[in-house]
Image (tube, rainbow, N blue to C red):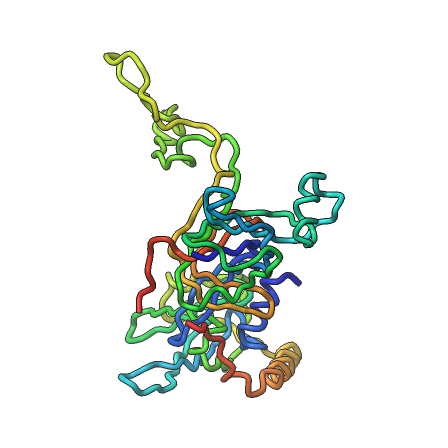
């Protein structure tokens, strides 16, 4: 599995060889830097820690400044770990670019969904709406939430509440195009979060590309 | 200009065909018959333009054997080789959906004439010149 960090730039469309429209999300990904190598002996598991996007020293807490200084790289805004099955082959300070991906492969994209605040059951859970006419007063209300006999509410009952701003993984999206010059990934379909938001792109965990 | 707009300019045709609502047009559309390709003409009236950038499309309406037929063409599609305007129309709305409910004489659209038409024609020619041999520069995905 390979991982790269980036920012969602927005959606557009391409035409494939047959002239069919392919909707794509453009992600500006990398270049990332390996900021730490974790090993089984020392940390109990093998992993790479990747850093993305430079920030000024003043934006980073002192302990973190030391962490970056030890590797000799500029402070980074985002740090994420990539778990490895075998000991890491890269060393701290190595660059990780967009070239780890090839066109046609499937990727998972992890991001933070758009925040919708305190949302009702219709938006949050897809409940149906009541009639707006014929004297109905129940238009966007949740309806019954239980029975009199049990006398309690079952845990997990879907209700209104905070919606969005959570970690979402969209799985098995096809990589349609890779622009190594500008560090752009063209990923078929939509990706969680608003434009400009931080996303992680990794090789798909479950899916396999169809021939 | 943001990144997405830049990308769309690179991917799409440099200059999309100059088409407006109310125009009578000929769409040169590439169709595939078996393993042969040929250009088919679809002649009709533009009753709507939708979308922006590379996603811009036109709705073209024509009457075939008494039956209304509407097709939507993406202006930047490599299959749309060209769209030529045979007649400029004068219309007062952006979508001519009212034509769907009309038959016969009611479906006519006035023609743009006079000085304005001449200026428009001149502008069209300039746009066409800018398009040059660009019609073959088809945006394609690597996939």
In depth, the one of A187 and A42 nearer the eye is A42
Depicted B24 relative to depicted B132: above or below: above
Residue at image position (56%, 63%) is A97
Residue A21, image x and y in percent?
42, 67
Horizontal side of A149 relative to A121 (left or right) equals left
Number of numbered discs overlaid on the protein picture? 0
Residue at image position (29%, 72%) is B66
Residue A147, image x and y in percent?
26, 17
Depicted A53 relative to depicted B95: above or below: above
Outermost residue on the left side: it is A149
Outermost residue on the right side: it is A58
Horizontal side of B64 relative to B116 (left or right) equals left
Q: Give the quarter of the figure containing the C terminus of chain A.
A: bottom left
Residue B121, image x and y in percent?
61, 82
Residue at image position (49%, 84%) is B136
Write down the quadrant of residue A19 in the picture: bottom left
Horizontal side of A143 relative to A26 (left or right) equals left
Depicted A129 relative to depicted B87: above or below: above
In depth, the one of B84 and B143 nearer the eye is B143
Residue B2, image x and y in percent?
64, 61
In depth, the one of B143 and A93 nearer the eye is A93
Q: Give the quarter of the figure containing the N terminus of chain A.
A: bottom left
Depicted B130 relative to depicted B59: above or below: below
């Amino acid at each position: 599995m390979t991982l790269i960090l980036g920012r969602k730039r927005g959606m557009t469309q391409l035409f494939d060889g047959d002239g069919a429209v392919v909707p794509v999300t453009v992600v500006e990904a990398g270049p990332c830097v390996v900021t730490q190598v974790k090993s089984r002996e020392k940390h109990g598991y093998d992993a790479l820690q990747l850093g993305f996007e430079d920030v000024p020293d003043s934006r980073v807490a002192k302990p973190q400044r030391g962490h970056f200084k030890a590797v000799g790289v500029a402070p980074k805004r985002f740090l994420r770990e990539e778990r490895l099955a075998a000991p890491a082959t890269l060393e701290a300070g190595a660059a990780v670019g967009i070239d780890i991906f090839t066109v046609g492969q499937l990727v998972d994209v992890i991001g933070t969904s758009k925040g919708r605040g305190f949302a009702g059951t219709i938006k949050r859970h897809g409940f149906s709406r009541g009639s707006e006419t014929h004297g109905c007063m129940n238009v966007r209300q949740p309806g019954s939430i239980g029975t009199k006999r049990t006398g309690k509410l079952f845990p997990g009952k879907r209700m209104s509440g905070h919606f969005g701003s959570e970690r979402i993984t969209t799985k098995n999206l096809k990589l349609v195009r890779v622009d190594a010059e500008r560090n752009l990934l063209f990923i078929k379909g939509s990706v969680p979060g608003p434009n400009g938001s931080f996303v992680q792109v990794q090789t798909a965990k479950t899916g396999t590309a169809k021939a | 200009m943001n990144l997405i707009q830049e990308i769309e300019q690179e991917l799409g045709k440099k200059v999309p065909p100059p088409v407006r609502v109310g125009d009578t047009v000929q769409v040169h559309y590439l169709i595939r018959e078996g393993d042969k390709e040929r250009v088919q003409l679809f002649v009709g009236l533009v009753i709507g333009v939708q979308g922006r950038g590379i996603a811009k499309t036109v709705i073209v309406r024509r009457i075939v054997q008494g039956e209304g037929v509407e097709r939507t063409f993406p202006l930047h599609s490599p299959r749309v080789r060209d769209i030529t305007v045979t007649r400029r129309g004068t219309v007062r709305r952006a979508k001519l959906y009212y034509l769907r409910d009309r038959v016969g004489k009611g479906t006519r659209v006035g023609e743009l004439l006079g000085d304005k038409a001449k200026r428009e024609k001149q502008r069209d020619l300039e746009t066409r010149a800018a398009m040059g041999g660009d019609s073959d520069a088809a945006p394609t995905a690597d996939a």
